[in-house]
Image (cartoon, rainbow, N blue to C red):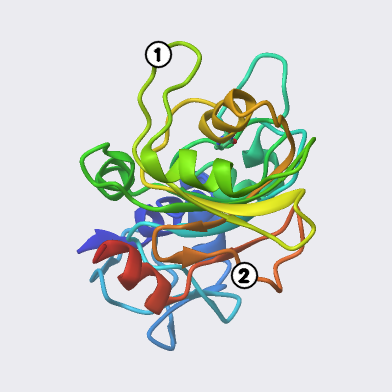
């Protein structure tokens, strides 16, 4: 049980004062009935609506973002625009953070959440959550690159990578690579070690989560309950 004004403010969409004003103005209903008292207690599973629109539950939020190039995967940065700038203010205030990073020039699937334990688990090196990237290189990929990836490459600085799967696409200049770990600049460093620098990189899968082909670059959407359950059970 929580006070109604606290429940509204907990979404990050309104301050406590704004929440009280909304309630007093008769714009807030609980399970269909208008409540005008901010201190009214509501249970966690009560259906709270503002102007007839149901709130997200008080629980964590999971967002799929199609990251464009040019933004950094951080919650704040003194110089650069961050991926959070693509979200509306109510989500910017909610304490969401990217689960994992993509380089500034990398595009594709980024999960944003305020579920710290889940993010921690997905990113833990022990969990080996698969990540799939589409890549383009300067040069031509061949069977020796596939073999090197499969054997687990040693990078220029001596870093030993886990075995990875590289699939070369018919044009020879692009491919799909599946990593079972997430080291700094890993795809770019692996391909650089093969003398075929990456010219374009896009993440298309993160664990069980596929980048939604209908989600335009720079857009976001909440995960469906099925997608959330898949992530949680991974
Ligand atoms: N590997 C990279 O080199 N960059 C990314 O952004 C992700 C994986």
- Residue drawn at 71 percent across, 29 percent down: 197
- Residue drawn at 39 percent across, 53 percent down: 130
Q: Position of residue 4 (x, y in %)?
A: 36, 62
Query: Which is more toward the observer, 227 or 97?
Result: 227
Is 53 positioned to the left or the right of 88 in the image?
left
Say which quarter of the image contains residue 211. bottom right
Callout 1: SS: loop
- The alpha-carbon separation of the residues under discs 2 and 1 comes to 36 Å
Say which quarter of the image contains residue 45. bottom left
Query: Which is more toward the observer, 196 or 26?
Result: 196
Residue at the farthest bottom position: 32
Say if 56 sits above or below 49 in the image: above
Say if 167 sits above or below 195 in the image: below
Say if 147 sits above or below 155 in the image: below
The residue identified by callout 1 is: 158
Q: Position of residue 228 (x, y in %)?
A: 37, 68
Instruction: Answer whether residue 91 is visible to the viewer in this image.
Output: yes
- Residue drawn at 53 percent across, 41 percent down: 93
Say which quarter of the image contains residue 120. top left
The residue identified by callout 2 is: 212
Pick the quarter of the image with the C terminus.
bottom left
* Dot label at residue 171: none
Instruction: Answer whether residue 98 is visible to the viewer in this image.
Output: no
Query: Mark 2 CB in 8 Å range of ligand 1?
Result: no
């Amino acid at each position: 049980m929580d006070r109604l004004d606290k429940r509204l403010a907990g979404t990050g969409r309104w301050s406590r004062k704004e929440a009280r004003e909304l309630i007093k103005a008769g714009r807030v209903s609980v399970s269909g009935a208008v409540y005008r008292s901010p201190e009214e207690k509501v249970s966690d599973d009560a259906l709270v609506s503002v102007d007839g629109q149901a709130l997200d539950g008080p629980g964590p939020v999971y967002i799929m973002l199609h990251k464009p190039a040019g933004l950094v995967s951080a919650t704040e940065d003194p110089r650069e625009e961050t991926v959070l700038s693509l979200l509306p203010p109510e989500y910017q205030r909610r304490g969401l953070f990217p689960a994992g990073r993509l380089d500034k020039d990398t595009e594709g699937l980024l999960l944003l959440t305020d579920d710290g334990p889940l993010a921690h688990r997905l990113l833990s090196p022990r969990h080996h959550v698969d990540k799939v990237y589409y890549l383009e290189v300067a040069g031509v990929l061949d069977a020796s690159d596939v073999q090197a990836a499969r054997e687990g490459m040693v990078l220029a600085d001596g870093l030993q990578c886990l075995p990875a799967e590289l699939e070369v696409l018919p044009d020879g200049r692009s491919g799909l690579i599946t990593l079972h770990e997430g080291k700094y600049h890993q795809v770019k460093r692996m391909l650089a070690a093969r003398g075929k620098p990456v010219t374009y990189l896009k993440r298309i899968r993160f664990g069980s989560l596929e980048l939604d082909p209908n989600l335009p670059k720079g857009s976001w959407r909440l995960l469906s309950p099925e997608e959330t359950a898949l992530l949680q059970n991974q």
